[in-house]
Amino acid sequence: MSELVTGEAVALELRPAKLPSRALAVLLDLVVAVAVYVIVTIGLVASTAALDDAAQLAISIASFVLVLVGGPIAVETLSHGRSLGKLAFGLRVVRDDGGPIRFRHALVRGAVGVVEILMTFGIVACIASLVSARGRRLGDVFAGTLVVRERIPVGRMPFVPPPPPWLAGRFSGLDLSAVPDGLWLAIRQYLTRMHQLDPQVGGAMAERLAMDLAARTGAPAPQGIPAAAYLAAVMQERQAREARRAFGNREAGITHPAQGGHHPQPGSGGHPSGAGPAAQTPGAHPYSYPSAPHGPSATPGAASQQAPQAPQPAVQQADHVDRPATGFVPPA
């Protein structure tokens, strides 16, 4: 993977094309160009038979330049770096900053390609591509271009388990700017494979990752919350912030509690104080956390240690039935 920086200081991760795929693409382009050149030459010979030798030589040179040199330049310019061979093998020529090439880039590549590909049978181009860190030939170096792969096999992304519902929005105030990408990747890999690990090994790994994450955020991990649930909740918070930054709150469907978002009500299942099905029913969550207070044996005291307790109503349900709508008790 090659990291390119655009003019707007945006880092692009592009995968440079390797020598075998580039060689096959060039070979296919040459076969097509030579076939067109032979057809054009046969037509010119038949139509210029009455001319003298000098005129026929000039016409043959002009046809060679136009077909074998000008043709690839025109194709790469009009297709923005995708010739027939590159299209067949999923390649594209781009600028060093990742943008589409223009006529001047294709002209330099084509002119240098006459020397390093046609006149030397591709030997110079192969040597330059092997020496270059990004597989560029001399034409790419002089033109400031790079051949990258467009069709990259994408595997199935592993599913990152969401945190328990009673931890949703709990870590919205954490400062995640100091957490490096390597630690996020380690946390993601652990969350996707934690049920494949030995319980003791997975628990120790979760504790270590939680300690590293707490050290980076500057806030200690809450007591009583399983390390895996803590990691999943912070990971969900990071993903929510990225979605808000990319699409905005309304488009992403994410609202912050401080911005008028939905606050879980008692009995709705979104808080430990509400004994809803989502909070207490085993199997309601795709991944179970053994230490989480959402099992059948969970008690209100244990739930109060995990998350702040919602204010309880000061009166019993029966009082709401007997009292009028104003809430005042009529005199006896």
Image (cartoon, rainbow, N blue to C red):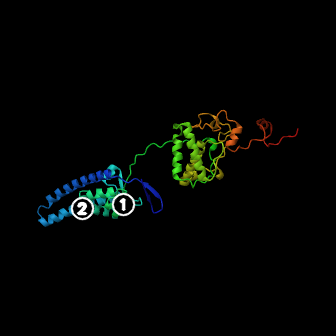
Which of the two discs, 1 and 2, sits closer to the camera? Answer: 1
Identity of the amino acid at label 2?
Leu
Q: Is residue 30 visible?
A: yes
> Relative to residue 122, is residue 188 drawn left or right?
right
- Mark 2: few, some, or many residues within 10 Å (few <14, many ≥20)? some
Q: Secondary structure at mark 1?
A: strand
Q: Is residue 236 visible?
A: no
Residue 246 % position (x, y): 53, 54
> Relative to residue 278, is residue 318 drawn left or right?
right
Residue 272 % position (x, y): 67, 40
The residue at which mark 2 appears reads as: 66
The residue at which mark 1 appears reads as: 145
Viewer-proximal residue among 179 and 31: 179
Numbered-mark total: 2
**Residue that appears at 51% across and 44% down:** 189
**Residue that appears at 70% across and 36% down:** 299
